Image: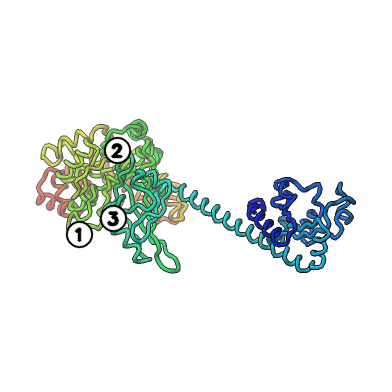
Amino acid sequence: MVELMAVKDYAQQIAEAIATVVKIDIEIADHNLIRIAGTGKYHKGVGLSMDRQGYVYQEVLRTGHQFVIETPGHHPLCTPCKARGNCSEKYEVVSPINVDGKAVGAIGLICFTDAQAKLIEENQHSYLIFLTKMAETIALKLKEQEFLAGLVSSNHYLNSIIDCLDEGLLTADLDGNILHFNQAAKRLFSANLLTARSHLNSLFTARIVEDILKVGKNENEIVEREVHVETKKNRVQMVLCALPIDSEEGVKSIAVILRPFDEINRMVNRLTLQDAGYTIQDILGDSETMCQIREQAKIVATSKSTVLIRGESGTGKEMLARSIHNLGPRQQGMFMAINCTAIPEALLESELFGYEDGAFTGARKGGKIGKIELANKGTLFLDEIGDMPLFLQAKILRVLQERQIERIGGITPIPVDVRVIAATHRNLEQMMVKGEFREDLYYRINVIPMHIKPLRDRKEDLTVLCDHFIKVYNKQLNKNVKALSEGFRQRLREYSWPGNVRELQNIIEYAINLTEGSTLTEVHLSPRLKQTSLHDDLSGFNLEAIERETILRCYQTFGAGVRGKEKAAIALGIGLATLYRKLARYNIE
């Protein structure tokens, strides 16, 4: 609560006005009995304590009621006073200054002559009302001061909150004149660009300003644009959001929020880290090769160099890439995974590099940020890089060498700081011989090679993998599987696993869905494994069996589509027509 001392100048003016009118001295004290105003002989005592003579004031403050002392120096309230019986005052009227029902001070009208005393006594009722009104006037001023102090405090508090924001915030009127800005915005722009009443045109392009001002015409309009801000130090990529500030009379001004693009990336990554948060312990396996993979991952995670992960489909290449990312110093950055096979060739370039506004017919207004930019300060995972078109291989090579990109339709190079991890199941060396993969890109991505062996070559990992998947699907499917029968285990050991760990996961999920007990047996195997007969040592030398197994594994690797068959035929070194005949012969379709 504001103290009465805060309005002492106003109180002095009131005291002097009253004294001038009634020709009688006035003194005003606060709740601590400090004289804050006075006239006549009391003027010199302003600012001093009244605790040794203000006994009447003490009672007024205690009770909150008016007091009239007709015989100062002889009244019971004057008993403690040293001037008792010899008081110079002839008559005294004291009224409380009440604020919200509490006495915060007192105002007194003091007579020093018999004529003054007689005048007050004869018109006591009128003077009491007058003094009460003066006390109320001071109380209202105090409330006003308290209200203004509250506004100042609230304004300071709100400004402090706004200045705490990492985002730059500025407001502008409907003509684009800047009204207010926070400290973050001030740090972004130089002092001559961002000042009160400067214009948005000094900060942004005419196209962006036009979009911002559209918000002022529609209270439901919100504009989001990507902008490049020329700051005091460098050129920063930011996301601009403009929204209306409306009142009962409609939109009055516009708020413009500027968020650093890197911070948005970090925030998205923090929120999604739980889903992508693989650790090196998630790379399961007791085999020597998997132990070596885990140790190698711990070492290369701290590096900035490019990693090339080789391995068949389903071996866990992306999981290994995520583990490397989450082990290294870029773990707070984005892990951006791009499957070069899954995205149509016509769209892959725009997905990777983004495009500027109006770069081509159908381009989204405002342009689009590419995946490489999104991965800035993080990791870019190029899965199945062997399927990337040759013209894009050249552009990826430039990213690795120059550490910058150009969007489609853009003319300004954009610096990027990304670590690239590539993965493929294809034989890149053969592809280079055939001219299907650039030799310079191969050597640029193959700085740190890592190879995950197929599951058929590390079947000692079957036990730990099965135990893991059983725990996962027991929880998901509300089952209670605790063991595998020996026959079930034998079938798993005999199977060639063309689909690797992903196929094993599928087999365990299928079996747990079928069982009602606590043990998985051969009955719960998928039809594919049931059809695989146990064979003796000599059966492994049967050429037809080997050919069928090879074609089946290749067929499952590349898929059943026409393009998949074409790739399978190339990998097998046979013609497409020959592949179709063998698929029919071995009943693989």
- Which residue is drawn at the image coordinates 44% and 56% (left, top)? 516
- Which residue is drawn at the image coordinates 70% and 65% (left, top)? 133
- From the image, tell me which residue sits under label 2: 419
Asked whether 501 or 460 is in front, the reply is 501
Q: Quadrant location of residue 327?
A: top left
Distance of label 3 from label 2 (alpha carbons):
33 Å
Q: In this view, does 239 lie to the left or right of 475?
A: left
Query: Which image quadrant: the N terminus?
Result: bottom right
Q: In this view, does 99 lie to the left or right of 559?
A: right
Marks 3 and 2: CB-CB under 8 Å?
Answer: no
Residue 106 on image: x %, y %: 74, 56
**Mark 3, secondary structure of its residue:** helix
Query: Which image quadrant: the C terminus?
Result: bottom left
- From the image, tell me which residue sits under label 1: 362
Residue 97 on image: x %, y %: 71, 59
Q: What residue type is labelled 3?
A: Ile
Q: Which amino acid does label 1 sit on?
A: Gly
Badge 2 or badge 1: first in the primary sequence: 1
Residue 455 on image: x %, y %: 30, 41
Distance of label 3 from label 1 (alpha carbons):
20 Å
Badge 3 or badge 2: first in the primary sequence: 3
Q: What residue type is labelled 2?
A: Arg
- From the image, tell me which residue sits under label 3: 208
Q: Which marked residue is nearer to the observer: mark 2 or mark 1?
A: 1
Marks 2 and 1: CB-CB under 8 Å?
Answer: no
Q: Quadrant location of residue 412?
A: top left
Q: Which marked residue is nearer to the observer: mark 3 or mark 1?
A: 3
Query: Up-down: is 212 above or below 276?
Result: below
Circle 1 packing at 10 Å, graded few (<14), some (14-19), many (20+), is few
- Which residue is drawn at the image coordinates 39% and 41% (left, top)? 332
Marks 3 and 1: CB-CB under 8 Å?
Answer: no
